[in-house]
Image (tube, rainbow, N blue to C red):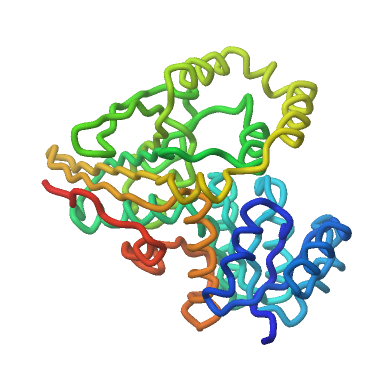
Amino acid sequence: MNPDFLLYGANGYTARLIIEQAARYGLKPILAGRNAEKIAELARQYALEYRIADLANAATLDAALVGVPVVLHCAGPFSKTALPMQQACLRTQTHYLDITGEVAVFEQGKALHQQAVERQIMLMSGVGFDVVPTDCMALHLKNKLPDATHLQLAFANNGGSVSRGTALTAVENLGTDGLIRQNGQLKAVPNAYKTLEVPFELGRKHVCATIPWGDLSTAYTTTAIPNIETYMAMTPGMIRGLRLGNTLGWLLGSKPVRTFLQKRIEKRLTGPDAGVRSRARSLVWGRAENKTGQSVEARLVCPEGYTLTATMALIITQKVLNGNWQPGYQTPAGLYGEGLVLEGGGEWGNRSAK
């Protein structure tokens, strides 16, 4: 069986889940990354081909993409790693997928749309939990209320935990502003500047606070709804911590603090084990409203976030390999429809009602 795609950042937590699930989808990745020792060991463990390439070295990166139809990029933080890989994909006419949830990366991909069209490749970020279920939710609500002007999206991890990569990305964003989309434009706001009680499950509400989630970019691209807020379920302590960061951002964003936190994360965190992943669920809620005050709500129940990321990344990779792609920058639900998340085990909860 010949390799089907390049998996860059293959020694990361989520990438390992992708490797373990790939055979279920009839897929065989080429493992890639910059750490020769770790990538080679991983390749031996799974009997897979591997290639070593540094994102800072265009020549080695281009060489790694030779004969590869699509790259699944899993090396974060994507704010630093996505552009070099996207540029390599443009040079080598290779389709690009990643698992980011960072607004800036989505906006960056959108800015490369015309170049990707000219090179006849697809650029699609956010092919995992960030942002497949929320992108599908946004399109579902738009389809139910086509004249919607306001959109609220929220999610909760019910029983899950974070990986090293996710935590490191969070550290990279310390000291930065929150975001919303207002009248079609991204607008900086304080972190956790709004809270909302969200009924992820009937009869039970969770307190959520605004965060700069990727849908502030993708949901706007997918639906053209001009006013969007994104929320995550949080404890009161988490909300207080985010708001404290609004006044101490200069300190939290300083190099010494970031270095200290990064070292602690790299030493202590791996990611949820198989038992946790099998028990946990991710919950998604959305609400859209039009100018007259008419509204529609919906809920999704999905597998645990990392499990869903691995599954959806492979499903979308498989679609691209089968010729189901469009040139240029695309969003998951924008191209594949609101039912995409159902292919990865998502289920609609109480369906939307006006």
Q: Is residue 105 above or below residue 193?
A: below
Q: Does residue 278 appear left or right of residue 1 in this picture?
A: left
Q: Is residue 133 above or below residue 72?
A: above
Could you say where residue 204 lies in the image, as x and y percent from the top left?
Answer: 24, 31
Choose top left, top right, bottom left or bottom right for residue 33: bottom right
Q: How many marks?
A: 0
Could you say where residue 83 lies in the image, as x and y percent from the top left?
Answer: 69, 55
Quarter that holds the N terminus: bottom right
Could you say where residue 265 lies in the image, as x and y percent from the top left?
Answer: 71, 33
Report the residue at 84% width, 55% height from top.
Answer: 56
Q: Does residue 110 appear left or right of residue 54 in this picture?
A: left
Choose top left, top right, bottom left or bottom right for residue 247: top right
Report the residue at 57% width, 66% height from top.
Answer: 21
Could you say where residue 81 lies in the image, as x and y percent from the top left?
Answer: 71, 52
Q: Is residue 47 above or below residue 158?
A: below
Query: In terms of depth relative to the viewer, which is nearer, 339 or 28?
Result: 28
Q: Does residue 42 appear left or right of residue 221 in this picture?
A: right
Report the residue at 86% width, 60% height from top.
Answer: 57
Q: Does residue 246 appear left or right of residue 61 in this picture?
A: left
Query: In terms of depth relative to the viewer, which is nearer, 115 or 200?
Result: 200
Report the residue at 34% width, 66% height from top.
Answer: 337
Q: Residue furthest front?
A: 275
Choose top left, top right, bottom left or bottom right for residue 205: top left
Q: Is residue 40 above or below residue 220?
A: below
Query: In terms of depth relative to the viewer, which is nearer, 28 or 330?
Result: 28
